[in-house]
Image: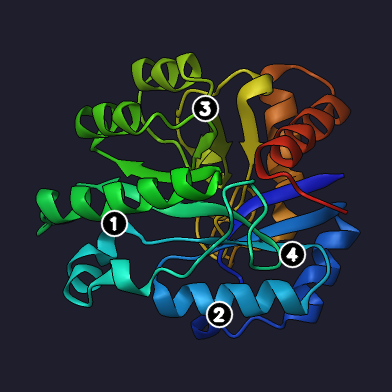
Amino acid sequence: MLIDSHCHIHDPQYHFDAAEILARARYADVQKVIVIGTSPDDNRIAQAFAEDHDGVYWSYGAHPGESNELLKEDFQERIPVLGDGSGKSSFSKLVAIGEIGLDYHYQPFNKQQQIKLFEQMLDLAQKHNLPVIFHVREAFDDFWPIVDNAKIKKAVLHSFSDNKANLQQAIQRNFYIGVNGLATFTNIPLPPLEYMLLETDAPYLTPKPFRGKINEPSYVKNIAEWVADKLEVPFDAVAATTTQNATELFNLQD
């Protein structure tokens, strides 16, 4: 079995046929999928999508690129009661807080607003004992002190695309690393298998040999095959270890 630990197939702007895309995923042995929230409206769509489909879970997020608008709307007041701190949320199939983090790639950006929103969401994760899905790009110098101050223990760095030094920093904190199609056409350093989650980030970052097509969860199998070849380990080992990692991090239930 394989798990797509990060995708956006709930996004209505891409007009996915949910039945077809999930059937193709299952045919490729991708039995579980996590759809990732990025804003209040997107979170509601992700929640409804997960609750309507077997084998689909969701996360409650606030993308750093949304920080200006979310803080204007007083996002903190729009955060619902997610659970009692036991790790079991009051929302069916909610498994994480994310994606959240810092992104200094696109100008203009406001560091202070991104950091404020990030810290609010980290507080939420700690309050409700939920793992975190991080989005970090060109911002690790600010990211590490904030995460350490929040004492985050269970997390994954989604779509890691940085250097070996920051990869090692993540591993030292026992964070998982999300590996997706980006790795198949760049020179991103790979984590050891025991720290790896597989993801697509669909509809983005389509792996080789499907570049130019819209990404989808079924391509997790191709990413797993690429990882097996790159690390020179059996495909079954990649599938088993990454599935176990995702299951444990997100407390996925059958």
Q: Quadrant of the N terminus?
A: top right
Q: Mark 4 and 2 residues: CB-CB less than 8 Å, in contact?
A: no
Mark 2 element type: helix
Three-letter residue code for mark 2: Ile
Mark 3 element type: loop
Q: Earlier in the sequence, mark 2 or mark 3?
A: 2
Mark 4 element type: strand
Front one among 249 and 36: 249
Instruction: Classify 10 Å Cα crowding around label 1: few (below 14), some (14-19), many (20 and above).
Output: many
Q: Is residue 52 left or right of residue 100?
A: right
Q: Mark 4 and 1 residues: CB-CB less than 8 Å, in contact?
A: no
Q: Earlier in the sequence, mark 4 or mark 1?
A: 4
Query: Residue under circle 2?
Result: 45
The figure's colour scheme reads rainbow
Instruction: Classify 10 Å Cα crowding around label 2: few (below 14), some (14-19), many (20 and above).
Output: some
Three-letter residue code for mark 4: Val
Instruction: Classify 10 Å Cα crowding around label 3: few (below 14), some (14-19), many (20 and above).
Output: many
Asked if residue 237 is positioned above or below residue 118 in the image, the reply reads above
Query: Residue under circle 4?
Result: 56
Query: Residue under circle 3?
Result: 175
Q: Position of residue 79 (x, y in %)?
A: 40, 68
At x 47%, y 14%, the residue is: 172
Query: Residue under circle 1?
Result: 64
Q: Earlier in the sequence, mark 3 or mark 4?
A: 4
- In the figure, residue 236 lies in which quadrant? top right
Q: Mark 1 and 2 residues: CB-CB less than 8 Å, in contact?
A: no
